[in-house]
Amino acid sequence: MTFKKKLTPSPLHADTGIRTAVVRARSALLSAAFVLPFLTIFATQLLAQPKIILQTTPGPTEIPLQAASNVIIDPLTGDITAIPDDPEACTGTGTGACDAQVDVISFNVNPSTVSQGQTFVASFNQRGAWECERTGLPGTTWDSSWATPGTGQFSVIVGSAVDPATYTLTLTCRNGTSGGAAIDSLSRSLVVNASSGGGTPQFCLDQGRVPPSAWTQELNADASAQSKVTQTWISAFGGTGFPFGDGINMRIRSNRYAAFFFNTGTEGQSGQINFSDLGASVINVRQGRAMVSLSACPGDFLPQSGTAALCRLPGVGSAIPNFGWRRSTAAPVTACVLPPNAEFYLNVTFITQETEGETNPNNWDWGCAPDAPPLACGWRMTHSFSP
Protein backbone atom coordinates (compact mmCIF):
# COMPACT_ATOMS: atom_id res chain seq x y z
CA MET A 1 0.00 0.00 0.00
CA THR A 2 1.59 3.33 -0.93
CA PHE A 3 0.85 6.72 0.69
CA LYS A 4 0.47 9.98 -1.27
CA LYS A 5 2.21 13.05 0.02
CA LYS A 6 -1.00 14.74 0.96
CA LEU A 7 -2.71 12.43 3.38
CA THR A 8 -6.44 12.73 3.85
CA PRO A 9 -9.01 10.04 4.60
CA SER A 10 -9.36 9.48 0.87
CA PRO A 11 -9.47 6.04 -0.76
CA LEU A 12 -6.51 3.69 -1.04
CA HIS A 13 -6.60 1.97 -4.41
CA ALA A 14 -6.29 -1.84 -4.55
CA ASP A 15 -3.98 -3.66 -6.93
CA THR A 16 -6.36 -6.16 -8.58
CA GLY A 17 -3.55 -8.56 -9.49
CA ILE A 18 -2.04 -9.27 -6.06
CA ARG A 19 -4.73 -7.47 -4.06
CA THR A 20 -2.13 -5.06 -2.70
CA ALA A 21 -3.19 -1.49 -2.00
CA VAL A 22 -0.51 1.01 -2.95
CA VAL A 23 -0.32 4.64 -1.90
CA ARG A 24 2.72 6.90 -2.45
CA ALA A 25 4.43 9.49 -0.26
CA ARG A 26 7.75 11.00 0.60
CA SER A 27 8.72 9.61 3.99
CA ALA A 28 10.03 13.02 5.03
CA LEU A 29 6.52 14.44 4.59
CA LEU A 30 4.53 11.40 5.69
CA SER A 31 2.18 12.32 8.55
CA ALA A 32 1.70 8.69 9.56
CA ALA A 33 2.82 6.90 12.71
CA PHE A 34 3.48 3.20 12.72
CA VAL A 35 2.72 0.97 15.70
CA LEU A 36 6.12 -0.72 15.68
CA PRO A 37 8.63 -2.00 18.23
CA PHE A 38 11.35 -0.04 16.43
CA LEU A 39 11.86 2.01 13.27
CA THR A 40 14.86 3.76 11.75
CA ILE A 41 15.05 5.78 8.58
CA PHE A 42 17.42 3.19 7.15
CA ALA A 43 14.98 0.30 7.42
CA THR A 44 13.89 -1.21 4.11
CA GLN A 45 11.72 -4.04 5.45
CA LEU A 46 9.73 -4.22 8.67
CA LEU A 47 8.62 -7.67 9.69
CA ALA A 48 4.92 -8.47 10.12
CA GLN A 49 3.05 -5.48 11.52
CA PRO A 50 -0.61 -5.51 12.68
CA LYS A 51 -1.68 -2.13 11.28
CA ILE A 52 -0.73 1.28 9.94
CA ILE A 53 -1.99 4.40 11.72
CA LEU A 54 -2.47 7.63 9.78
CA GLN A 55 -2.53 10.71 11.99
CA THR A 56 -5.59 12.26 10.34
CA THR A 57 -7.94 14.93 11.71
CA PRO A 58 -10.03 14.86 13.87
CA GLY A 59 -8.86 11.35 14.82
CA PRO A 60 -6.36 8.77 13.59
CA THR A 61 -7.24 6.36 10.78
CA GLU A 62 -6.19 2.75 11.31
CA ILE A 63 -5.67 0.32 8.43
CA PRO A 64 -5.31 -3.31 9.62
CA LEU A 65 -2.71 -5.28 7.68
CA GLN A 66 -2.80 -8.87 6.51
CA ALA A 67 -1.33 -11.38 8.97
CA ALA A 68 2.38 -12.01 8.38
CA SER A 69 2.49 -9.02 6.00
CA ASN A 70 5.77 -7.15 5.91
CA VAL A 71 5.95 -3.38 5.49
CA ILE A 72 8.54 -2.36 2.90
CA ILE A 73 9.98 1.16 2.69
CA ASP A 74 11.97 2.20 -0.37
CA PRO A 75 14.93 4.19 1.01
CA LEU A 76 15.30 6.17 -2.24
CA THR A 77 11.73 7.20 -2.98
CA GLY A 78 10.10 6.85 0.44
CA ASP A 79 7.38 4.63 -1.04
CA ILE A 80 5.69 2.40 1.53
CA THR A 81 4.20 -0.93 0.48
CA ALA A 82 1.98 -3.20 2.58
CA ILE A 83 -0.93 -5.61 2.14
CA PRO A 84 -4.12 -4.56 3.96
CA ASP A 85 -6.34 -7.11 5.65
CA ASP A 86 -9.21 -5.91 3.43
CA PRO A 87 -7.91 -5.67 -0.19
CA GLU A 88 -10.57 -3.04 -0.92
CA ALA A 89 -10.08 -0.99 2.22
CA CYS A 90 -11.18 2.61 1.68
CA THR A 91 -12.02 2.10 -1.99
CA GLY A 92 -15.70 2.85 -1.49
CA THR A 93 -16.69 -0.74 -2.34
CA GLY A 94 -15.03 -2.63 0.52
CA THR A 95 -16.13 -3.03 4.11
CA GLY A 96 -14.98 0.42 5.10
CA ALA A 97 -12.18 -1.01 7.24
CA CYS A 98 -10.36 2.35 7.45
CA ASP A 99 -13.51 3.83 9.02
CA ALA A 100 -12.49 7.42 8.24
CA GLN A 101 -14.78 10.00 9.76
CA VAL A 102 -16.92 11.92 7.26
CA ASP A 103 -18.34 15.35 8.03
CA VAL A 104 -20.69 17.44 5.90
CA ILE A 105 -19.46 20.66 7.46
CA SER A 106 -21.86 23.01 5.70
CA PHE A 107 -24.56 22.97 3.01
CA ASN A 108 -26.59 25.97 1.84
CA VAL A 109 -28.90 26.99 -1.01
CA ASN A 110 -29.15 30.63 -2.05
CA PRO A 111 -31.75 31.93 -2.51
CA SER A 112 -33.97 29.47 -0.67
CA THR A 113 -37.05 30.60 -2.64
CA VAL A 114 -37.11 30.66 -6.45
CA SER A 115 -39.67 30.70 -9.25
CA GLN A 116 -39.77 28.25 -12.13
CA GLY A 117 -37.09 29.25 -14.61
CA GLN A 118 -34.84 30.79 -12.00
CA THR A 119 -31.51 29.65 -10.58
CA PHE A 120 -30.18 28.96 -7.10
CA VAL A 121 -26.62 28.33 -5.98
CA ALA A 122 -25.84 25.24 -3.92
CA SER A 123 -22.65 25.39 -1.86
CA PHE A 124 -21.23 22.79 0.47
CA ASN A 125 -18.10 21.80 2.32
CA GLN A 126 -17.23 18.27 3.43
CA ARG A 127 -14.22 16.32 4.61
CA GLY A 128 -13.25 12.68 4.36
CA ALA A 129 -15.82 11.61 1.77
CA TRP A 130 -15.15 9.14 -1.02
CA GLU A 131 -18.47 9.96 -2.68
CA CYS A 132 -21.59 12.08 -2.22
CA GLU A 133 -25.23 11.79 -3.31
CA ARG A 134 -27.68 14.67 -3.92
CA THR A 135 -31.43 14.08 -3.69
CA GLY A 136 -34.70 15.96 -3.33
CA LEU A 137 -35.16 17.94 -6.57
CA PRO A 138 -35.79 15.53 -9.48
CA GLY A 139 -35.64 16.92 -13.00
CA THR A 140 -32.69 19.22 -12.22
CA THR A 141 -28.92 18.96 -12.10
CA TRP A 142 -29.14 18.93 -8.30
CA ASP A 143 -30.16 15.28 -8.14
CA SER A 144 -27.16 13.01 -8.61
CA SER A 145 -26.36 9.43 -7.62
CA TRP A 146 -23.18 8.49 -5.76
CA ALA A 147 -20.17 10.20 -7.33
CA THR A 148 -16.95 11.94 -6.31
CA PRO A 149 -17.81 15.13 -4.39
CA GLY A 150 -16.64 17.52 -7.13
CA THR A 151 -16.87 21.27 -6.77
CA GLY A 152 -18.20 22.82 -3.59
CA GLN A 153 -20.39 25.37 -5.41
CA PHE A 154 -22.53 25.23 -8.53
CA SER A 155 -25.68 26.70 -10.04
CA VAL A 156 -28.93 24.79 -10.44
CA ILE A 157 -31.64 25.93 -12.86
CA VAL A 158 -35.20 25.11 -11.84
CA GLY A 159 -37.19 24.53 -15.02
CA SER A 160 -40.94 24.66 -15.57
CA ALA A 161 -41.04 20.85 -15.29
CA VAL A 162 -40.47 21.25 -11.52
CA ASP A 163 -43.87 21.67 -9.86
CA PRO A 164 -44.38 24.57 -7.42
CA ALA A 165 -43.85 23.13 -3.92
CA THR A 166 -41.46 23.04 -0.98
CA TYR A 167 -38.63 20.57 -1.53
CA THR A 168 -36.15 19.05 0.92
CA LEU A 169 -32.70 18.90 -0.65
CA THR A 170 -30.33 16.43 1.00
CA LEU A 171 -26.58 16.06 0.59
CA THR A 172 -25.21 12.73 1.82
CA CYS A 173 -21.48 11.91 1.82
CA ARG A 174 -19.75 8.69 2.79
CA ASN A 175 -16.45 6.81 2.82
CA GLY A 176 -17.11 3.23 1.76
CA THR A 177 -20.40 1.56 2.54
CA SER A 178 -20.10 1.39 6.32
CA GLY A 179 -22.27 3.47 8.60
CA GLY A 180 -21.44 5.23 11.83
CA ALA A 181 -18.86 7.99 11.48
CA ALA A 182 -18.17 7.08 7.83
CA ILE A 183 -21.39 8.69 6.54
CA ASP A 184 -22.98 12.10 7.15
CA SER A 185 -25.72 14.27 5.61
CA LEU A 186 -27.38 17.69 5.79
CA SER A 187 -30.74 18.86 4.39
CA ARG A 188 -32.07 22.26 3.34
CA SER A 189 -35.51 23.45 2.18
CA LEU A 190 -36.14 25.07 -1.20
CA VAL A 191 -39.43 26.76 -2.09
CA VAL A 192 -40.34 26.73 -5.78
CA ASN A 193 -43.06 29.13 -6.92
CA ALA A 194 -44.89 29.27 -10.23
CA SER A 195 -43.17 31.24 -12.99
CA SER A 196 -43.79 34.97 -13.05
CA GLY A 197 -42.08 35.58 -16.40
CA GLY A 198 -38.41 35.66 -17.30
CA GLY A 199 -36.13 32.93 -16.02
CA THR A 200 -34.93 29.89 -17.92
CA PRO A 201 -37.56 28.27 -20.17
CA GLN A 202 -37.79 24.49 -20.01
CA PHE A 203 -36.72 24.08 -23.64
CA CYS A 204 -33.37 25.72 -22.76
CA LEU A 205 -32.75 22.97 -20.23
CA ASP A 206 -33.90 20.26 -22.63
CA GLN A 207 -31.54 21.54 -25.35
CA GLY A 208 -28.60 22.09 -23.01
CA ARG A 209 -28.55 25.82 -23.73
CA VAL A 210 -27.39 26.71 -20.25
CA PRO A 211 -24.22 28.16 -18.70
CA PRO A 212 -21.57 25.96 -17.05
CA SER A 213 -22.94 24.49 -13.82
CA ALA A 214 -20.00 25.87 -11.84
CA TRP A 215 -20.62 29.45 -13.06
CA THR A 216 -23.06 31.91 -11.54
CA GLN A 217 -24.93 34.89 -12.95
CA GLU A 218 -23.28 38.26 -12.42
CA LEU A 219 -26.02 40.17 -10.61
CA ASN A 220 -23.94 43.31 -10.06
CA ALA A 221 -22.54 44.05 -13.51
CA ASP A 222 -22.29 47.86 -13.16
CA ALA A 223 -18.67 48.73 -12.32
CA SER A 224 -19.72 52.27 -11.41
CA ALA A 225 -22.49 51.11 -9.03
CA GLN A 226 -21.38 47.72 -7.77
CA SER A 227 -24.25 47.20 -5.33
CA LYS A 228 -26.85 47.78 -8.05
CA VAL A 229 -28.71 44.67 -9.24
CA THR A 230 -28.47 44.37 -13.04
CA GLN A 231 -30.64 41.56 -14.39
CA THR A 232 -32.63 43.44 -17.04
CA TRP A 233 -32.01 45.66 -20.04
CA ILE A 234 -33.48 48.64 -18.16
CA SER A 235 -31.26 48.11 -15.10
CA ALA A 236 -28.20 48.00 -17.36
CA PHE A 237 -28.91 50.55 -20.10
CA GLY A 238 -31.60 52.71 -18.48
CA GLY A 239 -34.39 54.12 -20.60
CA THR A 240 -37.82 52.56 -20.94
CA GLY A 241 -36.72 49.21 -22.34
CA PHE A 242 -35.22 47.72 -25.50
CA PRO A 243 -34.03 49.26 -27.80
CA PHE A 244 -33.85 52.51 -25.77
CA GLY A 245 -31.23 53.40 -23.20
CA ASP A 246 -27.74 54.73 -22.72
CA GLY A 247 -25.01 52.38 -21.50
CA ILE A 248 -23.18 50.68 -18.64
CA ASN A 249 -19.59 50.39 -17.43
CA MET A 250 -19.88 46.62 -17.41
CA ARG A 251 -17.82 44.31 -15.21
CA ILE A 252 -18.11 40.52 -14.90
CA ARG A 253 -16.22 38.65 -12.22
CA SER A 254 -14.40 35.35 -12.69
CA ASN A 255 -16.56 32.33 -13.68
CA ARG A 256 -19.70 34.41 -14.09
CA TYR A 257 -21.90 35.63 -16.92
CA ALA A 258 -24.26 38.57 -17.38
CA ALA A 259 -27.79 37.94 -18.64
CA PHE A 260 -29.91 41.07 -19.24
CA PHE A 261 -33.59 40.20 -19.77
CA PHE A 262 -35.72 42.24 -22.22
CA ASN A 263 -38.74 42.05 -24.49
CA THR A 264 -37.81 42.56 -28.13
CA GLY A 265 -40.98 44.66 -28.76
CA THR A 266 -41.41 46.18 -32.20
CA GLU A 267 -39.41 49.43 -32.02
CA GLY A 268 -36.38 49.86 -34.26
CA GLN A 269 -35.38 48.10 -37.46
CA SER A 270 -31.75 47.39 -36.66
CA GLY A 271 -29.14 48.28 -34.11
CA GLN A 272 -25.86 47.41 -32.49
CA ILE A 273 -24.40 46.94 -29.05
CA ASN A 274 -21.10 48.78 -28.88
CA PHE A 275 -18.04 47.86 -26.78
CA SER A 276 -15.45 50.54 -25.97
CA ASP A 277 -12.76 51.31 -23.40
CA LEU A 278 -13.95 51.75 -19.84
CA GLY A 279 -11.79 54.77 -19.20
CA ALA A 280 -9.45 55.67 -16.35
CA SER A 281 -12.26 56.16 -13.85
CA VAL A 282 -12.95 52.42 -13.71
CA ILE A 283 -10.20 50.49 -11.88
CA ASN A 284 -9.51 46.81 -11.22
CA VAL A 285 -11.37 45.72 -14.37
CA ARG A 286 -9.50 44.09 -17.26
CA GLN A 287 -10.61 44.23 -20.88
CA GLY A 288 -10.54 41.05 -22.94
CA ARG A 289 -12.26 39.01 -25.66
CA ALA A 290 -15.94 39.02 -24.73
CA MET A 291 -18.42 36.33 -25.78
CA VAL A 292 -21.81 37.90 -26.60
CA SER A 293 -25.14 36.34 -27.55
CA LEU A 294 -28.78 37.29 -28.00
CA SER A 295 -30.90 34.29 -27.00
CA ALA A 296 -34.20 33.21 -25.50
CA CYS A 297 -32.08 31.39 -22.88
CA PRO A 298 -30.09 33.15 -20.13
CA GLY A 299 -26.40 32.29 -20.12
CA ASP A 300 -26.68 30.57 -23.52
CA PHE A 301 -23.40 30.77 -25.44
CA LEU A 302 -23.68 27.51 -27.40
CA PRO A 303 -22.58 27.58 -31.05
CA GLN A 304 -25.59 27.74 -33.39
CA SER A 305 -26.09 26.87 -37.06
CA GLY A 306 -27.57 28.77 -40.02
CA THR A 307 -28.58 32.39 -39.49
CA ALA A 308 -28.84 31.71 -35.72
CA ALA A 309 -25.04 31.56 -35.72
CA LEU A 310 -25.10 35.35 -36.08
CA CYS A 311 -26.72 35.60 -32.63
CA ARG A 312 -23.48 34.44 -31.00
CA LEU A 313 -20.24 36.33 -31.44
CA PRO A 314 -16.87 35.55 -29.79
CA GLY A 315 -13.95 37.96 -29.57
CA VAL A 316 -16.00 41.12 -29.08
CA GLY A 317 -13.96 44.08 -27.87
CA SER A 318 -11.10 46.01 -29.47
CA ALA A 319 -10.92 43.91 -32.65
CA ILE A 320 -14.71 43.50 -33.02
CA PRO A 321 -16.20 46.61 -31.38
CA ASN A 322 -19.92 45.87 -31.83
CA PHE A 323 -22.61 43.20 -32.04
CA GLY A 324 -25.45 43.79 -34.51
CA TRP A 325 -29.15 42.86 -34.68
CA ARG A 326 -31.99 43.42 -37.17
CA ARG A 327 -35.71 42.74 -37.65
CA SER A 328 -35.79 41.78 -41.31
CA THR A 329 -35.34 38.16 -42.34
CA ALA A 330 -34.71 39.13 -45.99
CA ALA A 331 -31.48 37.85 -47.50
CA PRO A 332 -28.68 38.46 -47.08
CA VAL A 333 -28.92 38.12 -43.30
CA THR A 334 -25.88 39.87 -41.85
CA ALA A 335 -26.87 40.25 -38.20
CA CYS A 336 -28.83 38.46 -35.48
CA VAL A 337 -32.56 38.45 -36.34
CA LEU A 338 -34.83 39.36 -33.42
CA PRO A 339 -38.47 38.26 -33.56
CA PRO A 340 -41.06 40.81 -32.39
CA ASN A 341 -42.51 40.79 -28.85
CA ALA A 342 -40.32 37.91 -27.67
CA GLU A 343 -38.58 37.39 -24.32
CA PHE A 344 -34.82 37.50 -24.92
CA TYR A 345 -31.52 37.89 -23.07
CA LEU A 346 -28.38 39.81 -23.87
CA ASN A 347 -25.69 37.43 -22.58
CA VAL A 348 -22.06 38.43 -22.00
CA THR A 349 -19.12 36.49 -20.57
CA PHE A 350 -15.43 35.78 -21.21
CA ILE A 351 -14.43 32.34 -22.55
CA THR A 352 -10.97 31.27 -23.71
CA GLN A 353 -10.49 31.14 -27.46
CA GLU A 354 -9.37 27.50 -27.13
CA THR A 355 -12.64 26.34 -25.53
CA GLU A 356 -15.25 28.72 -27.01
CA GLY A 357 -16.17 26.18 -29.71
CA GLU A 358 -17.03 23.44 -27.20
CA THR A 359 -20.66 22.29 -27.36
CA ASN A 360 -20.62 21.21 -23.70
CA PRO A 361 -20.77 24.37 -21.54
CA ASN A 362 -18.93 22.61 -18.71
CA ASN A 363 -15.84 22.41 -20.96
CA TRP A 364 -15.56 26.21 -21.23
CA ASP A 365 -12.73 27.94 -19.40
CA TRP A 366 -12.93 31.45 -17.99
CA GLY A 367 -11.09 33.58 -20.50
CA CYS A 368 -9.92 36.82 -18.92
CA ALA A 369 -7.11 37.86 -16.57
CA PRO A 370 -5.61 34.34 -16.08
CA ASP A 371 -2.66 35.96 -14.31
CA ALA A 372 -4.98 37.72 -11.85
CA PRO A 373 -8.19 35.65 -11.47
CA PRO A 374 -9.72 37.88 -8.74
CA LEU A 375 -9.96 40.78 -11.21
CA ALA A 376 -13.23 41.39 -13.06
CA CYS A 377 -13.36 41.85 -16.82
CA GLY A 378 -15.55 44.23 -18.81
CA TRP A 379 -16.14 47.01 -21.33
CA ARG A 380 -18.10 50.22 -21.69
CA MET A 381 -21.27 48.87 -23.32
CA THR A 382 -23.69 51.20 -25.17
CA HIS A 383 -26.51 50.69 -27.66
CA SER A 384 -27.59 52.48 -30.82
CA PHE A 385 -30.39 51.71 -33.28
CA SER A 386 -32.19 52.86 -36.40
CA PRO A 387 -35.95 53.63 -36.04
Image (cartoon, helix red, strand yellow):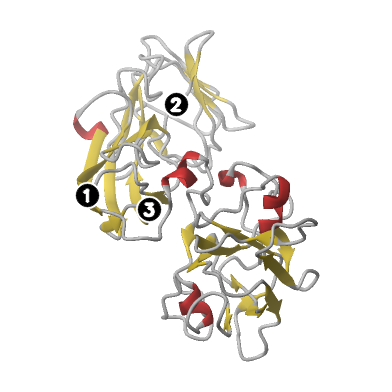
On screen, residue 30 above or below 175: below
Measure how far apart labels 2 and 1 are at the Cα level: 32 Å
Mark 1: which secondary structure? strand
Q: Position of residue 211 (x, y in %)?
A: 52, 52
Comparing marks 3 and 1, which lies closer to the viewer? 3
On the question of residue 257 being in view, the answer is no
* Lower sequence index among marks 2 and 1: 2
Near-viewer residue (234 or 266)? 266
* Lower sequence index among marks 3 and 1: 3
Measure how far apart labels 3 and 2 are at the Cα level: 42 Å
* Lower sequence index among marks 3 and 2: 2
Residue drawn at point x = 70 percent, y = 57 percent: 329
Q: Position of residue 324 (x, y in %)?
A: 70, 68
Q: Position of residue 273 (x, y in %)?
A: 66, 73
On the question of residue 21 being in view, the answer is yes
Name the quadrant containing residue 74.
top right
Mark 3: which secondary structure? loop
Comparing marks 3 and 2, which lies closer to the viewer? 3
Mark 2: which secondary structure? loop
Label 1, residues with CA under 10 Å away: few <14, some 14-19, many ≥20: some
| Residue that label 1 marks | 188
Q: Amino acid at mark 1?
A: Arg
| Residue that label 3 marks | 117
User: Which image quarter holds the C terminus?
Assistant: bottom right
Name the quadrant containing residue 52.
top left
Q: Position of residue 315 (x, y in %)?
A: 74, 62
Relative to 333, is 232 on the left or the right? left
Q: Amino acid at mark 2?
A: Leu
| Residue that label 2 marks | 12
Comparing marks 2 and 1, which lies closer to the viewer? 1
Give yes or no for contact between labels 3 and 1 (Cβ–Cβ under 8 Å). no
